[in-house]
Image (tube, rainbow, N blue to C red):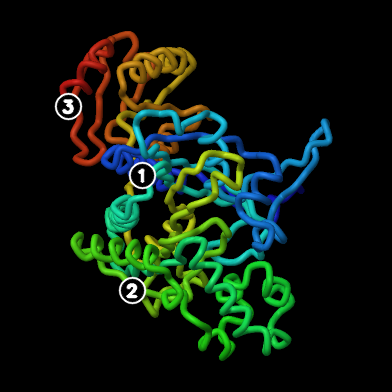
Amino acid sequence: MINIPRGTQDILPAETKKWQFIESRLEYLMTLYNYQEIRTPIFESTDLFARGVGDSTDVVQKEMYNFKDKGDRDLTLRPEGTAAVARSYIEQKMHGDPNQPVKLYYIGPMFRYERKQKGRYRQFTQFGVEAIGSEDPSVDAEILAMVMHIYESFGLKNLKLVINSIGDIDSRQAYNEALVEHFEPVIGDFCSDCQTRLHSNPMRILDCKVDRDKPAIQTAPRITDYLNEESLAYYNRVKSLLNELDIRYEEDPNLVRGLDYYTHTAFELMIDDPSYDGAITTLCGGGRYNGLLQLLDGPNQTGIGFALSIERLLMALEQEGIELVDTEPLDLFIVTMGDQADHFAVKLLNQLRKSNISADKDYLKRKIKAQMKQADRLSAKYTIVLGDQELENNTVDIKNMESGNTETIELNNIVEFFKNKE
């Protein structure tokens, strides 16, 4: 027997209804904020992620699915969405669009070779948003308001928004120098990844899952102490706007996010519930990226965005006991007796479905009792039993499965019967 690849999952029909509901809700919310969908390839040039995500990140160093095609080109299954959107923004010359910023969203599968655990898969579905073309704190506030709106619209309550500023390039350089000076005397006590990153990307040490409890992490310099005047003013404006919007947040000076292209605002949304039964409490994360497009040989444009995992959203909803959708009941189930009735039912089903009436029939030539059980399992609102006599008389008894009441109607009036029920 061939088994499913490790770190992936089959989403069966009972669950796909939940996925469809979530996707539909997200698409509706995006219309409220005037964001348009973009669809990029599932695989891209490996260099896109090496440059856009950063050589020193775990994503690039350890987690990407890389392969060569028949033309000996280095390709990668996309591990995240922002770099691909930025590539498309540059290649399709979206900076020339008169409507700026360009507001985009995407949804689709991403791939990372990670250790399998609850809520984390090697193929996962990510929904993301990018607003490119404006360096305005009000766009940051809009994105953060959107994040809260999304999760609250599903009924989630135990949420904590955590924010920080990573500052501009000058602020980051000053802060990186302070981190190197702080960690250098004790770096031998840290993991090999942290030792490698000390001089290439010291901020990533603060985000290390192996060494996060070490005293040197707790006493490390704070980025907010190294923000220059411009960066501090930007950060204060974002916080002021959040206060005006009555969006509660907490500040965490050690929040640096895992990708290299972030500047200024960085944030995460977390489950704030000690009883949460999940190894991963972060639901969503993102931030502003000033310089990403230039790294990819694009224009000097800035953007901000976030990404969320549909799998983690479903876990949070399950944890809080929030039911998304009930099974959609079938309008009519046709119970058939004999070949002639079965043949007629095929044509009747086609007519019903073209009239937007959901209907089905038995395909296994089962007895009437078994067919009625099938109607119950499908939560059919109505059933009819169709045999030679019904065909000869051109009438049928239609049964309301909830009340048990029956009504005799002509066969050619079945569609009209359901239209009158609307």
Instruction: Please tell me the numbered disc located at residue 250.
Output: 2
Residue 416 in which image quadrant? top left
- Alpha carbon distance from label 3 to label 2: 52 Å
Q: Is residue 237 above or below residue 366?
A: below
- Alpha carbon distance from label 3 to label 1: 31 Å
> Which mark is first along the chain, 2 or 3?
2
Q: Residues within 10 Å of mark 3 (few under 14, many from 20)?
A: few
| Depth check, front residue: 131 or 398 | 131
Tag 3–tag 2 contact (CB < 8 Å): no
Residue 212 in which image quadrant? bottom right
Number of the front mark, 2 or 1: 2
> Which mark is first along the chain, 1 or 3?
1
The amino acid on which the numbered mark 2 sits, given as a three-letter code, is Glu
Q: Is residue 133 above or below residue 355?
A: below
The amino acid on which the numbered mark 1 sits, given as a three-letter code, is Leu
The residue lying at 44 percent from left, 76 percent from top is 253
> Which mark is first along the chain, 1 or 2?
1
- Alpha carbon distance from label 2 to label 1: 25 Å
For disc 3, the marked residue is: 421
Q: Say if residue 208 shows up in the picture.
A: no
116 sits to left or right of 163:
right
118 sits to left or right of 103:
right
For disc 1, the marked residue is: 26
Name the quarter where the C terminus is drawn. top left
